[in-house]
Image (cartoon, helix red, strand yellow):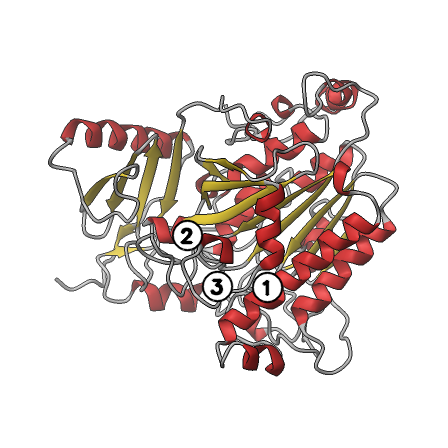
């Protein structure tokens, strides 16, 4: 059920033969020009860290606001994990973090040091996880290249090996970087989970230094524009993965002053400016009507996610529900809102369908195409979404697993063995654990969650022999 690799020439032939038969809408033809795909993924941007949410006074994101006014806002968009590396792996591979065996952020301090620190004083040891994306995984970039796309990865990768802080340039093994995973262009993508510096010199072996003091977010935006301009006459897939707004918090002094010393809000404004630069370039090149733009975050924010409970690193909504906007001039209704729950595992099948390919050629994919949602049709159905996070975090409810199906969300905490059941339609802030009121619903979801964990062969935590009761 979950085999995603292309194991025979026949599958490749099938892809090439049938890609033209699968277009964006039913009335599309095989002669339709393939749409460009611009996927903007922000690091650690919280659910309410955008102006259109009206939750935090002082945040200014006019360009992102415009995306919602001219496109579709997703209210129930999720990351497949409450931290970055697993979500990024789920996007690139189209599989859950549990399946791809990257369930936690890949530690810059090194795996041994990380595990020793996090397991200390805990009843359970963290489950094992990989420190890079295996090269045998078929990536979305490789799949789109079959469809004739130029591909670029610009920005944070964080799937390239452990121990990046001990390197001089963020490269643990160059074979782990995006240019060995189907991307024609790699600028900025290495093992770093956060930048060595937000200002040039960057100490990043995959990006040349600019003028002293050049701001990284601006530089990545400029590189994105260069790629668009160079590939304007052919289909392209641009993955712009900003390092912002991850710590260490840093922004140009002038912008910080304009926000009364709030560096985080200044970083968000610089992010917004560069989203605007990309959109303006698409407009200037007359590409908006043939380019779908997705704006998304890899996990919850660290600085509050009202009205949600929790933050990055937790299985509460604040750790996994993220802002998401999809924009496509003339194809997606302006100002529309979608309340259907979607997840990062859905991007791979979505992009394949948009490109004219067939997802069934990649039978290990665990998500569903969102194309019908863009059309205003909600036919994905009430499917379950899963999270498996067998890792300790200091921010809140972690070391556990969760399932959402419809309005119901069930969480099991492995360390404490506590269970939680929430009705998200009535309690988006997860204030009322209704486990005792609806025990049968909790048992049903717990059963479904365990069955899924067995199906994907999820790595589980083990007893910590050093724990003293």
Which of pointers 3 and 2 lies earlier in the amino acid sequence?
Answer: 2
**How far separated are the C-alphas under marks 1 and 3?**
16 Å
The residue lying toward the viewer, choosing from 284 and 212, is: 284
**How far separated are the C-alphas under marks 1 and 2?**
17 Å
Q: Residue at x 71, y 39 (%)?
A: 142
Q: Residue at x 15, y 64 (%)?
A: 468
Q: Is residue 338 left or right of residue 318?
A: right
Q: Residues within 10 Å of mark 1 (few under 14, many from 20)?
A: many
In the picture of the structure, the residue carrying the numbered disc 2 is: 82
In the picture of the structure, the residue carrying the numbered disc 1 is: 243
Would you place residue 236 above or below residue 177 in this image? above
Q: Is residue 138 left or right of residue 450?
A: right
| Residue 95: assigned label | none
Counting from the top left corner in percent of width and height, residue 229 is at: 85, 52
Q: How many marks?
A: 3
In the picture of the structure, the residue carrying the numbered disc 3 is: 107
Q: Residue at x 61, y 38 (%)?
A: 334
Would you place residue 26 above or below residue 309 in this image? above
Query: Mark 1 against mark 3, which lies toward the viewer?
Result: 1
Which of pointers 1 and 2 lies earlier in the amino acid sequence?
Answer: 2
Check disc 2 and report its element: helix, strand or loop.
loop
| Residue 141 visible in the picture | yes
Counting from the top left corner in percent of width and height, residue 73 is at: 52, 42
């Amino acid at each position: 059920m979950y085999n995603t690799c292309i194991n025979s020439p026949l599958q490749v032939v099938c892809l090439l033969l049938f890609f033209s038969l699968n277009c964006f809408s039913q009335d599309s033809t095989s002669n339709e020009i393939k749409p460009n795909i611009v996927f903007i993924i922000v690091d650690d941007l919280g659910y309410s860290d955008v102006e259109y949410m009206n939750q935090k006074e002082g945040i200014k994101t006019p360009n992102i606001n415009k995306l919602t006014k001219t496109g579709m806002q997703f209210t129930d968009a999720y990351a497949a994990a409450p931290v970055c590396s697993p979500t990024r792996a789920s996007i690139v591979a189209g599989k859950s973090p549990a399946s791809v065996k990257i369930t936690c952020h890949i530690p810059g301090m090194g795996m041994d040091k990380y595990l020793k620190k996090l397991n200390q004083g805990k009843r359970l040891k963290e489950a094992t996880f990989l420190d890079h994306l295996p090269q045998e995984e078929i990536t979305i970039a490789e799949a789109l290249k079959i469809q004739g796309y130029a591909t670029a990865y610009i920005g944070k990768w964080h799937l390239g090996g452990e121990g990046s802080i001990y390197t001089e340039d963020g490269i643990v093994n160059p074979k782990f970087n995006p240019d060995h995973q189907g991307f024609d262009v790699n600028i900025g993508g290495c093992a770093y989970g956060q930048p060595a510096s937000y200002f040039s010199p960057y100490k990043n072996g995959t990006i040349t230094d600019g003028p002293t003091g050049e701001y990284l977010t601006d530089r990545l935006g400029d590189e994105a524009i260069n790629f668009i301009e160079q590939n304007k006459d052919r289909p392209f897939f641009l993955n712009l993965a900003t390092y912002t707004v991850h710590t260490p918090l840093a922004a140009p002094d002038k912008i910080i002053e304009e926000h009364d010393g709030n560096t985080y809000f200044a970083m968000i404004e610089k992010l917004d400016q560069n989203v605007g630069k990309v959109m303006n370039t698409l407009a200037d090149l007359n590409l908006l009507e043939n380019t779908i733009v997705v704006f998304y975050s890899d996990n919850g924010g660290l600085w509050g996610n009202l009205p949600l409970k929790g933050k990055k690193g937790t299985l509460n909504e604040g750790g996994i529900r993220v802002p998401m906007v999809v924009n496509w001039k003339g194809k997606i209704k302006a100002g529309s809102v979608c309340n259907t729950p979607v997840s990062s595992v859905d991007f791979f099948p979505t992009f394949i369908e948009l490109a004219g390919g067939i997802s069934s050629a990649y039978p290990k994919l665990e998500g569903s195409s969102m194309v019908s949602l863009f059309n205003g049709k909600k036919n994905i159905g009430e499917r379950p979404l899963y999270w498996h996070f067998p890792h300790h975090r200091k921010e809140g409810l972690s070391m556990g697993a969760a399932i959402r199906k419809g309005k119901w969300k069930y969480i099991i905490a492995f360390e404490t063995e506590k269970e939680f059941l929430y009705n998200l339609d009535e309690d988006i802030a997860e204030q009322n654990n209704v486990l005792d009121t609806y025990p049968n619903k909790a048992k049903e979801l717990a059963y479904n969650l365990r069955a899924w964990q067995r199906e994907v062969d999820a790595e589980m935590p083990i007893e910590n022999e050093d724990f003293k009761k």
